[in-house]
Image (cartoon, rainbow, N blue to C red):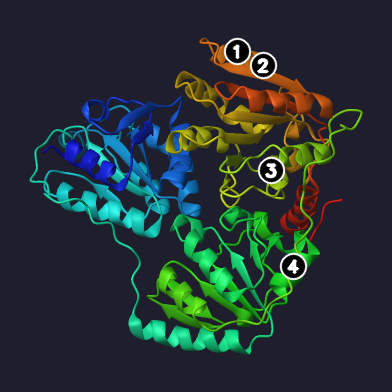
């Protein structure tokens, strides 16, 4: 078969059903192959950055995603999205259509280059944020496509495939069998040593706690995590990046752990445990307010391909096997588990006056349903929603480590296509929405029906909490958001609502509950300095860190 058809065949085998991107002349023959292929669909985006964000959102629910861009100008636009996927362990296949092999060999001055015969600059950039980089040709395609996709799956990192425009239709001898995706493996001798070390620590500890991180979700180990927690009977906390991975209505769940900016009760459970099982954790200042105050000597850390117990390292050990030996380390005495204060829905009577953050989030807490996909953009939306209790079966999508605002609106397109049977709720600020607003038109063009709740507070409140509370640089242009939706919606598929009071918010959410066959866009208007308490604390922490030692009043 042809190189392009073999690549599409392999993408289908790993579960890719939609490919995101923007057309360009160096990739168009491959796009013809996509359109002719069964079981895989082209999704055109408004720009390449949005396409990469959409592939990231898709991969978080689907297991893997793909984006196609053109050489240099397209791929560099998409690179921020690919880099975010790299940082947050999201497997995305970045496919770049390049000039023909003879054009690059002869160093011709062609478009999308600097005119100097240099064709490797964009690839050098991509190499910093991808686990593998391949220039495909008819001699290596059969091997290298399989190698790159296997590495993408195994490491949960993006890979970068360059497909010259004269290679896509070249015929190769493709392997007959399906691609066998690799999983992390274990050295039995290492496993035995880890089992002895970790088991001894668990048996000697008077208190044990379990902290859940995002790697559990990326590698599909949530069911095994639940069995581990119940086998140990210990309190369980979760980083916001793993929100919903462990059921938040479970008797053992104490709440979200956000380090020095978080709930003191959850901090005590996590930081004072004699033995802390950190399963798949990945820390960041936006998640824990800096380095957590935990003695490394008391941590048993489990990651996808390696673990540690205190300061002893155990490489070549899969998360599956590590959790299995921890679950069998012996019964624990019953622990007293006190759950942290949860943000719950208020009484039916709304508060008078203009809408405020505290009441907004308590209303949102009562809006979510089991199985929802909740997407929260960085800043006010992420800080407020991560403090809510999600019903069982909900997925929570955010990007706090890379922290690129505007990520979530295109990511919403990806999650919608990855899980079309579920309700999707996007929470986004006006500043974030203005960065990627045009992708709302793609959502509407495809007839998708999410709930979009936009907080209009006149700018970048997350930045105002750090510095420049009244600065002009934190202010954005006012838009008529209802008219924006109307402009993107010539088919009349959307319903808009504007809430300036709690009573109006209640009615808007009721509309969203009733109009499940329409996209519902809710604009919630609040004061520019009104922010969720977790965001206020994070802003103070980041201000102190960013501007130390001089300080800023």
Q: Measuring from the top left, give residue 419's x and y in whole percent.
A: 46, 38
Q: Secondary structure at mark 3?
A: loop
Q: Is residue 106 visible?
A: no
Mark 3 or mark 2, which is nearer the start of the sequence? 3
Query: How far apart in space, not on screen, are marks 2 and 3 (Cα)?
Result: 23 Å
Q: In which image quadrant can residue 348 be found?
A: top right
Q: Secondary structure at mark 4?
A: helix
Q: Are marks 2 and 1 in contact (CB under 8 Å)?
A: yes
Residue at figure coordinates x 29%, y 40% from the top left: 118
Query: How far apart in space, not on screen, are marks 1 and 3 (Cα)?
Result: 27 Å
In the rendered image, the vertical position of residue 47 relative to residue 369, given as above or below: above
Query: How far apart in space, not on screen, are marks 4 and 2 (Cα)?
Result: 42 Å
Query: How far apart in space, not on screen, are marks 1 and 4 (Cα)?
Result: 46 Å
Mark 4 or mark 3, which is nearer the start of the sequence? 4
Labelled disc at residue 486: 1
Mark 2, residue position: 482
Labelled disc at residue 241: none
Residue at figure coordinates x 44%, y 40% from the top left: 58
Question: For the residue carrying disc 2, how many other residues have a C-alpha within 10 Å: few (<14), some (14-19), or many (20+)?
Answer: some
Viewer-side label of 1, 3:
1
Q: Measuring from the top left, give residue 499's x and y in whole percent.
A: 77, 24
Query: How far apart in space, not on screen, are marks 3 and 4 (Cα)?
Result: 22 Å
Labelled disc at residue 267: 4
Viewer-side label of 3, 4:
4
Mark 3 or mark 1, which is nearer the start of the sequence? 3
Mark 3, residue position: 379
Mark 4 or mark 1, which is nearer the start of the sequence? 4
């Amino acid at each position: 078969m042809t190189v392009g058809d073999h690549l599409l065949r392999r993408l289908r085998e790993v579960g890719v059903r939609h490919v995101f991107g923007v057309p360009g002349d160096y990739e168009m023959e491959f796009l013809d192959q996509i359109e002719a292929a069964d079981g895989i669909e082209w999704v055109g985006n408004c720009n390449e950055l949005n396409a990469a964000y959409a592939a990231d959102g898709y991969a978080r629910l689907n297991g893997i995603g793909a984006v196609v861009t053109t050489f240099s100008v397209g791929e560099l636009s998409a690179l921020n999205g690919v880099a975010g996927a790299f940082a947050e362990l999201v497997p995305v296949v970045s496919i770049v259509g390049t000039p023909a092999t003879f054009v690059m060999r002869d160093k011709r001055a062609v478009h999308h280059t600097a005119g100097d015969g240099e064709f490797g600059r964009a690839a050098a950039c991509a190499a910093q944020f991808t686990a593998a980089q391949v220039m495909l040709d008819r001699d290596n395609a059969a091997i290298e496509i399989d190698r790159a996709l296997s590495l993408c799956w195994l490491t949960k990192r993006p890979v970068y495939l360059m497909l010259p425009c004269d290679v896509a239709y070249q015929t190769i001898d493709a392997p007959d069998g399906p691609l066998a995706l690799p999983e992390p493996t274990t050295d039995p001798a290492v496993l035995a040593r880890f089992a002895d070390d970790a088991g001894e620590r668990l048996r000697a500890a008077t208190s044990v706690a379990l902290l859940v991180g995002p790697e559990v979700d990326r590698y599909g180990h949530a069911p095994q995590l639940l069995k581990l927690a119940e086998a140990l009977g210990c309190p369980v906390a979760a980083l916001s990046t793993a929100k919903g991975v462990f059921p938040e209505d479970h008797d053992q769940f104490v709440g979200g752990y956000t380090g020095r900016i978080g709930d003191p009760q959850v901090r005590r459970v996590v930081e004072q445990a004699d033995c802390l099982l950190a399963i798949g954790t990945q820390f960041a200042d936006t998640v824990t307010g800096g380095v957590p105050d935990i003695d490394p000597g008391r941590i048993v850390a489990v990651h996808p391909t390696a673990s540690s117990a205190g300061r002893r390292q155990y490489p070549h050990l899969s998360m599956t096997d590590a959790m299995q030996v921890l679950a069998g380390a012996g019964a624990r005495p019953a622990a007293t588990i006190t759950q942290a204060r949860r943000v719950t829905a208020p009484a039916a009577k709304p508060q008078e006056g203009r809408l405020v953050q505290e009441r907004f989030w308590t209303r949102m807490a009562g809006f979510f349903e089991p199985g929802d996909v909740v997407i929260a953009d960085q800043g006010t939306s992420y800080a407020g929603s991560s403090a809510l209790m999600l019903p069982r079966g909900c997925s929570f999508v955010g990007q706090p480590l890379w922290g690129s605002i505007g990520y979530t609106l295109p990511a919403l397109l990806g999650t919608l296509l990855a899980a079309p049977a579920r309700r999707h709720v996007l929470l986004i600020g006006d500043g974030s929405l203005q960065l990627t607003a045009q992708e709302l038109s793609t959502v509407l063009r495809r007839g998708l029906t999410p709930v979009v709740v936009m907080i209009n507070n006149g700018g970048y409140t997350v930045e105002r909490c750090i510095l420049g509370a009244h600065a002009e640089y934190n202010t954005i242009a006012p838009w008529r958001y209802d008219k924006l939706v109307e402009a993107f919606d010539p088919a009349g598929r959307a319903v808009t609502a504007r809430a300036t009071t709690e009573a109006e918010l209640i009615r808007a959410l009721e509309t969203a509950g009733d109009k499940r066959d329409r996209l519902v866009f809710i604009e919630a208007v609040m004061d520019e300095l009104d922010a969720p308490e977790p965001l206020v604390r994070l802003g103070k922490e980041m201000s102190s860190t960013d501007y130390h030692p001089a300080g800023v009043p």
